[in-house]
Amino acid sequence: MNIRAISDVVSDLGEGPIWSPQTNCVTWTDITQNKFHTADLDTGATQSFSAPSMVGAIAHTRGDDYIAATQEGFAHVSIDGKFSALHTFLAADMRMNDGKVDPVGRFWAGSMALSFEKNRGSLYVLEKDGSYLSVLDNVTLSNGMGWSPDSNFFYYIDSIPGVLKRFDYKSVDGRISNPVDLITFDTSKGIPDGMSVTADGKIVVALWDGGRVEIYEPSGKKITEIKLGVSRPTSCTFGGADGNVLIVTTASQGIDLGKEPLAGKILAVTGTGLSGLPPHRYG
């Protein structure tokens, strides 16, 4: 197994990686620094863009620009990084966190209180027609999400209390139902953060303060883990021509870079035996 930094950029709170097969680039946010970056997976050549406020998550649209979950709500982002608000609805002491596009093109993103106050957050869906709605309330730290390859299940992490839930999912209307606590984490050994689903349905979860990603069967049974050499991995996705490069965002926040030189870097992990599909696009 090999772990390397894709880019020289050091993020304070790197999050939400997405890979584009069209450009062979990976894009991710640095939430606390009001930035997002895009880097060539092979060369590391990187472009950085400033945002008007915190960006919890960003996703490609079918038109090759972006949709974003921001400190205020939802925004459109042009290919050159210009932000245009779509919906402004979050309170001043809230922000969006992780987000992802579902199999039919809706953008899902969840909110959290800046103070981590319990049950203040919600999970929202930005529909393809530009309208939005709340689909889940009483969330504390809305985080990773994903869908099973057959689109029958939706996975969702609330980092506090440290539970990954599985919902039944209906792609035709985006309805989720029948929540099950699929995985309950021992948060003293790492807090579940962002996640990804492999092409064959395995669940890959980044553990903040855990220094690793963990891999689970769809049943919730742990298979194995991959140690990364950084304390604070935040999220993951797959990229590369064969989809077998595990891409992991990390944070340098609160870390001694002398002891963890890869902290805050976006990492490419090869030789895992895992592979995934390109992310869905909004629209």
Image (spheres, rainbow, N blue to C red):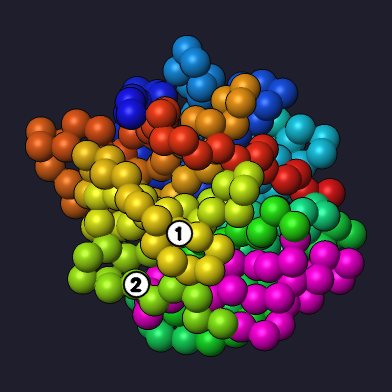
Residue for badge 2: 185
Spatial CA span between label 1 and label 2? 12 Å
- Residue 257's x, y, as percent? 16, 36
Q: Is residue 100 left or right of residue 63?
A: left
Q: Circle 2 — which element?
A: loop
Residue for badge 1: 216
User: Residue at position x 10%, y 37% from top?
Assistant: 259
Task: Please state the extent of the stretch shown in magenta in the rendering.
Answer: 151-179
Q: Look at label 2 and name its amino acid.
A: Phe
Name the foreground residue: 186 vs 1.
1
User: Residue at position x 25%, y 56% from top?
Assistant: 210
- Residue 130's x, y, as percent? 84, 60
Residue 170 visible in the shown view: yes
| Residue 179 image-quadrant placement | bottom right
Magenta-drawn stretch contains 223 = no
User: Residue at position x 41%, y 42% from top?
Assistant: 249
Which label lies toward us, 1 or 2?
1
